[in-house]
Each structure stands twice: as C-alpha cells, then as structure tokens.
Image (cartoon, rainbow, N blue to C red):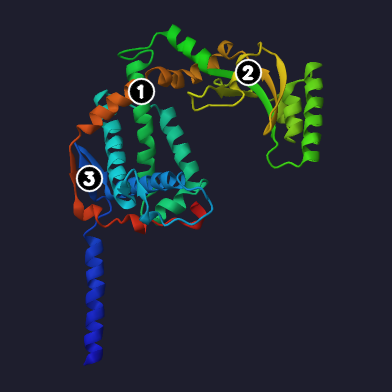
Amino acid sequence: MNTLKKLAAMLLCVCMLFTFAACHPKNEVALTIDDVKITSALYMYALITADGEARSKVDETKEDASAEVDYYKEKVDDKKFEVWVKDRAIELCKDLAANEIKFKEAKLSLTKEQKDEVKQYVDYYWSYYGYQALYETNGVSKETFSRAFESSYYLNEYFLSIYGEKGTNPVAKDEIIKTMDENFATANVLSVSLAELKDEEKADAEKKFNGYLDRLKKGEEFGKIYNEYYEIKETEEEKTEETKDEKAPKDEFATILGSDKTDYKNDNFKTVKEMKMGEIKLVKTESEIAILIRGDMMADEYWVESLTTPTLNLIKGEEFQKTMADFTKKLKVEKNSYAMNRFKVKNIVYPTAAQ
C-alpha cells in the first residue's frame, strides 16, 4: 500500500510539472509596451544583457580584477544587484519597443542587403562567437536574438530618416564634411606592441621597423611589407583577380583612426592629422612601435560614404538620444508577472564556452 501511495505521489508530481510547463507557451508575452509584445524569451535576453552590464559596473569598482566576486551581494547605482538588473531589463525592452514603434511610424523598411547583413552578423555571433551556448542554455532562441539584433538597424534607419540626406531635418553636407575631417583620418599602419617584450626583443623590433621605414622611403609598396610582416601569402589567382566589390576603399590597407569623440578612437590620430598626405613616419612609445603613412581620406568616396553616419552621430547623436529617451519614458508598460517571475537573475547560467 505504501508503495502504491509513493507511486501515486510521484505521478502527481510529474503531472504537476507537465501542467506547469504547459502553462508557459513558447511565445508567451511577458511585457506589452504600447502595442509591442515582448515575449518571455526576449525578456530573458534583456535580463542576460542587463546582468552583464551590472557585472561590468561592479568589476570596475574592484582593484583586484582576479578576485572572485559574489555579485548578488553587491550594489549597482545604490540598488541591490538583482533589482538593478530587473529594472535595466525593463529599460532595454522599452528601448527595443521604441525602436520598433518609430521604425513603423516612419514607414521604413530594411533593404534586402541590410536583411542579409543582419543574418550574417547573427549567424556569426551565434555560431562562432559563443552566443548560442549562452542564450540557448537560458532559453533564448536564435530567432529571439535576431529580433533584438535587428532592433539596432531600426534605430539607425530612423535616425537617418531625420538627419540623413533625404531626412526630414537633414544636416548640411558642408557641416558633415567639416566634422568628418576634424574627427577622422586614414593611414596605413604597421605596429608592434612592446608590452610583453623583453629588452632584447624590443631592440630587435625597433631594428626591423627601421628597416621597413627605409624600404618604404625608397619607394617599396606598403602592401608588400605588410604581407611580409604578417606572413600573408597571396596566390597568383588572388593577385590577378579583380575586385568584385564596388564598395571598397581605393587603398585596401587603409585604416580609420578617430578622435576621442569617436568609436574609432586611436592614440595615433593626432600624430596622423599633423602629417602631410603620403608622409611616412615611425612613432615609438613605451607601449608600441608603429609605422604610419597618412592617406587622403576625403579623396576616397568609400570612406566619405562609410563615415557619414558616424559623423552624423557626432553632430546630432545627443539630440537624437534625448528625443528617443523622452519618447521611451512615455511608453505604457503592462507586465505579465506570471510570465516574468519564472525568470530569476540568480538562475542565469554562464557556460564556460560562452565566457
């Protein structure tokens, strides 16, 4: 009799588990922000993102980066860790909803090229960057990750629909060119880090780079030295094949250097801006030896086109962020506590492979 009772109890537990699972459908809505439905999986994605941000904030306050940290005992911006993460997750969901709403209101759409680009990035991050191990472990599908990733494209297209050339409030081309020239430059760059080299190795590196400098000043092509330094060997087919990509820089070895205001911030930016077009210079600091050859960025349509959006962000980024922040604050949020409460910040799993 006892055995039958135990068996019945076990079966009851199993039934309850299946019933509980059945109450949480795959595309269950956790949040409704205006008319945008945020699925439970997307909310979980936001929790993971917020958790990562919170951990970074805590890590920045620690002097010993190698010491173990019990994050759940920490505070972030005077809030308990878990509270901050949950609040931030809601903010991230509201941002995503705002992007989708504004994109739709402006009657915008992504081109086939943009959609293909999104897919390529999603495939790369998912399969090769380790995101699959992190997100799938926590119940977030590739489809959900793709929706979150695509949101950034919506935001960018909405930004351009206002300040771009064909926007409702376009920035003058002269202002774009002036700001671009002030904050960006192109150069051929060959560099070596000295951080982990011994004195003898540093001396060898300096000798090698002085040799490269002499060869460049005598007219040898930068590409030949670049390939030699990085031991890159081109096949005859690659040497003779004409580029099929029309959107490519005139100088395939050109690198963008940016001012402190940009995402392309580089320590050699100021040095390059002071150089003449085509000038060759060797720069040595405590941490690096670099050969720089200044390029004519403004004469290359590829770079002018590529840097237009980053330049517009320098000019109108703060204004746009404030506009979006004001809009986002006004969004109505309806929470499905039953769907949200199944996710616990402490239960987020970070697989070793994803770290």
Secondary structure under tag 1 reads helix
Which of pointers 3 and 2 lies earlier in the amino acid sequence?
Answer: 3
Disc number for residue 291: none
Q: Residue under circle 2?
A: 272
Q: Is residue 336 left or right of residue 199?
A: left
Q: Residues within 10 Å of mark 2 (few under 14, many from 20)?
A: many
Name the foreground residue: 136 vs 86: 86
Task: Give the distance between the C-alpha atoms of the residues marked 1 and 3, in whole angstroms.
Answer: 28 Å
Q: How crowded is mark 3: few (under 14 residues within 10 Å), some or many (20 or more)?
A: many
Task: Give the answer, above or below, for where 304 lies relative to 66.
Answer: above
Q: How crowded is mark 1: few (under 14 residues within 10 Å), some or many (20 or more)?
A: few
Tell me where residue 271 appears, x and y as whole percent.
Answer: 63, 19
Disc number for residue 31: 3
Tell me where residue 279 appears, x and y as whole percent.
Answer: 70, 14
Tell me where residue 79 appears, x and y as whole percent.
Answer: 30, 47
Task: Give the answer, above or below, for where 147 lies relative to 337.
Answer: above
- Type of the residue with mark 1: Glu
Q: In this view, does 119 lie to the left or right of 219?
A: left
Q: In this view, does 150 lie to the left or right of 227?
A: left
- Mark closer to the observer (3, 2): 2
Secondary structure under tag 2 reads helix
Tell me where residue 73 appears, x and y as whole percent.
Answer: 36, 56
Decide if residue 335 is in sight here: yes
- Type of the residue with mark 2: Val
